[in-house]
Image (cartoon, coloured by chain):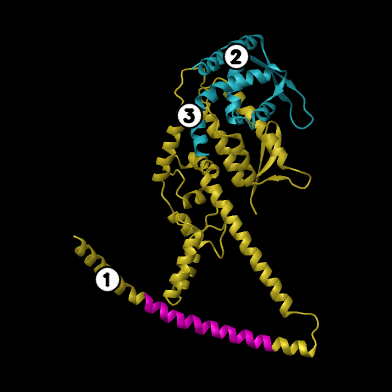
Chain colours: A yellow, B cyan
Amino acid sequence: MNKVITIHLAGRAFQLEEPGYDALRRYLDAAAAALENNPDKDEIIGDLEAALAEKCQAYLGAHKEVVVAREVEQMIIEMGPVKTDTSGETANPESAAETNRKNKERDAAAPKKLYQIREGAWLSGVCTGLAAYFGVDVALVRIIFVLLTLLTHGVLILLYILMMVIIPHADTPQARAEAFGTSPITAQDLVNRAKEGYEHFANSDEWRRWRRQMRQDSRQWKRQWRQERRQYRYEYYPRRRSFIGRLIHLVMEIVWLLFIIFCLWLAYYHFASVHQFINLLPQWADQAVAWIKSEWAAHH
Amino acid sequence: MDENIKIADTFSPIRRGLLELAVLRIVAHGEVYAADILKLLAGTELSTQEGTLYPLLSRMRREGWLDYAWQESEQGPPRKYYRLAPPGRERLAQAQKYWHTIIKNISNL
């Protein structure tokens, strides 16, 4: 539920969600600033507003009266930043490479923050957030997490729950950009540039690739889970069952229970051997080093 | 793919300069609406956005190359339809001649 703000563009009234209104306000303010010395400033702003009005109109229908924030964001990305038109006059157009370099510098300087990212999350988004923070694949983070959980006798689960509670969710565009450390945050132009920075990020291949991958992952995960649940329902809640059927069912359940107990025992057994293996690692490493040293000495 | 992007970057000032010629050529066909210009350019190497096009159109009108007329539209407020003014025709001829010279120079190297 979001507050709605009514605005008028080119003589027509539109209702926008509050965050969408803020974004639009920033966009038009930035446009006005860019056109400061342009003699046709007011006219161009009017044209832009008319174009925005048409875009808003396209999002509305008989049963949709409000333009949501996401749609406003989309509109602003489509419109593109307003550039003072300097071609034909003495101009110093910044080359694309230069802009790129500046963006990179800005990104490097931008502080990265740890957030939970819901997009592609299995549980709460702790792993996706950590992956974004360290710039590694989320699968790697999950594997490490599971391994560490096993090695620490499950203490990490507690840590996970703690992180779930403490780390904030990246729910705003700006927070999302910060989670990846791509947002241009400097104290004085935070307000003006946050939007622009997010656009740069939303258009970046990095974010697009990440999002595509995440969607695929979560879709697959959900599909599997749904399938399993359906199977479970089919097996455990049949409508009618004969006596023999019930007997088989009972036997199967006992077998299933025994299988789980076996699995647990196996896990415990392996757990011990994994411990042993890890304890032996330094010893093996020493042996390997000694062997390499002796080989080296023999050859020289 | 990366190479393509790099090349496109190198040519971006040229594309920016060519946008004026492209708009002159489009407007020369008859009266057009700004969104039509964007639609025609979309998908080409010269594709652009409102944020770039509107200031350009306003400058071209100031130079006297274009003028516009308001026309009623069925959906929404009246729209500005741009058309080529006589000085614009001259400008278009000059720009096209110059562009052809550049192409000739490049292909003769």
> Which picture quadrant has residue A297?
bottom left
| Numbered circle sitting on residue B83 | none
Q: Most prominent secondary structure in the magenta stretch?
A: helix
Query: Magenta residues, as a range?
Result: A251-277
Task: Identify the residue under disc 3.
Answer: B10
Please name the residue shown 44% across and 23% down the image.
Answer: A92
Label 3 CA crowd tier, 10 Å (few <14, some 14–19, many 20+): some
Which SS class for mark 3?
Answer: helix
Q: Position of residue A239 (x, y in %)?
A: 80, 80
Task: Identify the residue under disc 1.
Answer: A286
Identify the chain of the residue marked 1, using the numbered disc in the image. Answer: A
Report, in whole angstroms, how far the alpha carbon at label 2 lies from the one at label 3: 22 Å
Q: In this rendered view, identify the residue nearer to me: B19 or B108.
A: B108
Q: Are marks 2 and 1 on the same chain?
A: no
Please name the residue shown 64% across and 88% down the image.
Answer: A254
Q: Position of residue A229 (x, y in %)?
A: 68, 72
Please name the residue shown 47% across and 55% down the image.
Answer: A132
Q: Earlier in the sequence, mark 2 or mark 3?
A: 3
Amino acid on which the number 2 mark rests in the picture:
Gln
